[in-house]
Image (cartoon, rainbow, N blue to C red):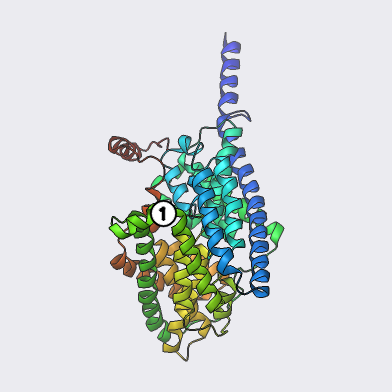
Amino acid sequence: MDHHRTTRRVRAIVRRHGPTAQTWRRRVAFLGGAIVIGLVAFAFAEAADWAARRFTTLERTWWWLPLLLTPAGFAFFAWATRRFAPDATGSGIPQVMAATRDPDDAMTSLTSAKTVVLKLILTIGAVLVGASTGREGPTVQVAASIMGYAHRLARVPIRASVFIAGGAAGVAAAFNTPLAGVAFAIEELAAAYEQRMAVLVMAAVLIAGMTSLGIAGDYVYFGAMRSTLPLTQAVLAAPVAGVVGGLAGGLFSRLMLAAGGSDWRPLVAVRRHKLIFAAACGLVVAILGVTAGLTWGTGYDAARSAITNGAIPWWYAPAKFATTLATAIAGIPGGIFAPSLSVGAGVGDLVRPMFPTAPGGTIVLLGMVAYFTGVVRAPLTAVIIIAETTASRGLMLPLLAAALIADFTAQIVSKERLYHGLSLRFGRMPEPTQVQHESDDRGNGSVPRA
């Protein structure tokens, strides 16, 4: 009897903790998904960079071509998005936030294979026609989908933490910034964060970042910026940059939210003609691009030039602000991460003359972190992204001060966080009773399903 009882106990332990147990399958899904995310993020980056170079070649050969190509491209991609993948519109981060509310339903809509494949194709297409957009937000949505399918393949229940891990791994792989991925998971998606999954989430982020790093090599996204800012200058520059960047970023956020949710009659009438509206947005981007010459794509070159003390025109920040807003509200896929950093560089360049004795690049970085924080309202993520993409760890305290001030200032202009507001337009909202039950579960130490 004792022998049979011992055998049953051993079998039970093996089923619960052995290689076939759900815990092990979940670990394999997290780690395997992270590797695939790193590979896909790298391939996506290469394709987007190719599209940007191709557009630059066309624009330099025939300066007038964008006046036709960009509006037509915007209209076509808006139609294709509405027709084939309505959940692929915009950045992708709001979709991931919405997916955490109902993970099972999200796998058939917000993060389905059809949605994310078309997201990849249409985002590359948007870059190819000169849209002021980035790949980082779409990478987050694609990464969340990959992580979801990895769990399906491993026959593991899909929780909110699956999409958190995937999205955070996408940030890490897109920017080559693992720490920013961890900060993003905690700060942007904290409402659905599951404490017991923290180690697996961080492991997925690090593995995705290391996979991308192993292929692309060790590089600093905007180039290394070794200058520091003396305390006497930092105590003045950080608040000024924080206020200016926070107000500008908050304005962008408010305009984006208003463009999709305002009841103002003229705006409602315009939104009814979605393809004409998309073409009009494309025409705005084309006119500013042709006249200004610097506002196409992510704005990476202009931002890098500003950081390295290269001169950029005073009008760059408002022009890039306008083209990024026009692209973001046009109803086509594409992110705002990289363009927002570029606008922030322009804001910092506008502030720079107020501090003539300070290293110019340091003021630009303060503007970048302040504006980016004003837009996304995630100061910790903003600081880590700027610090890691410029190797400017000596500026951590001034950057953090500017980000916190910008976060507070942006609330004056736009009380609602951008990604949270946009996420409410996707998926199903949880019932009030469900929210209460989940709150009670957290209070009792248990983990909700979604």
- Location of the C terminus by quadrant is top left
Q: How many marks?
A: 1
Please tell me whether residue 194 is drawn above or below residue 364 in the rendered image: above
Residue 447: image quadrant is top left
Does 272 sit above or below residue 339? Answer: above
Farthest bottom residue? 357
The part of the image, by quadrant, that contains residue 19 is top right
- Is 372 or 379 nearer to us in this picture? 372
Report x, y in % for residue 364. Answer: 49, 79
Q: Residue at x 37, y 38 (%)?
A: 445
Q: Nearer the viewer, residue 241 or 218?
A: 241
Vertical arrangement, residue 343 with respect to residue 115, above or below: below
- Which residue is under mark 1? 273
Q: Relative to residue 154, is residue 73 depicted above or below?
A: below
| Mark 1, secondary structure of its residue | loop
- Position of residue 179 in the picture relative to residue 408 (left or right): right
Q: Residues within 10 Å of mark 1 (few under 14, many from 20)?
A: few
Q: Position of residue 137 (x, y in %)?
A: 52, 56
Disc 1 residue type?
Answer: His
**Percent coordinates x, y for residue 236 in the rendering:** 37, 83
Q: Residue at x 51, y 56 (%)?
A: 75
Residue farthest toward the top in the current orientation of the protein:
1
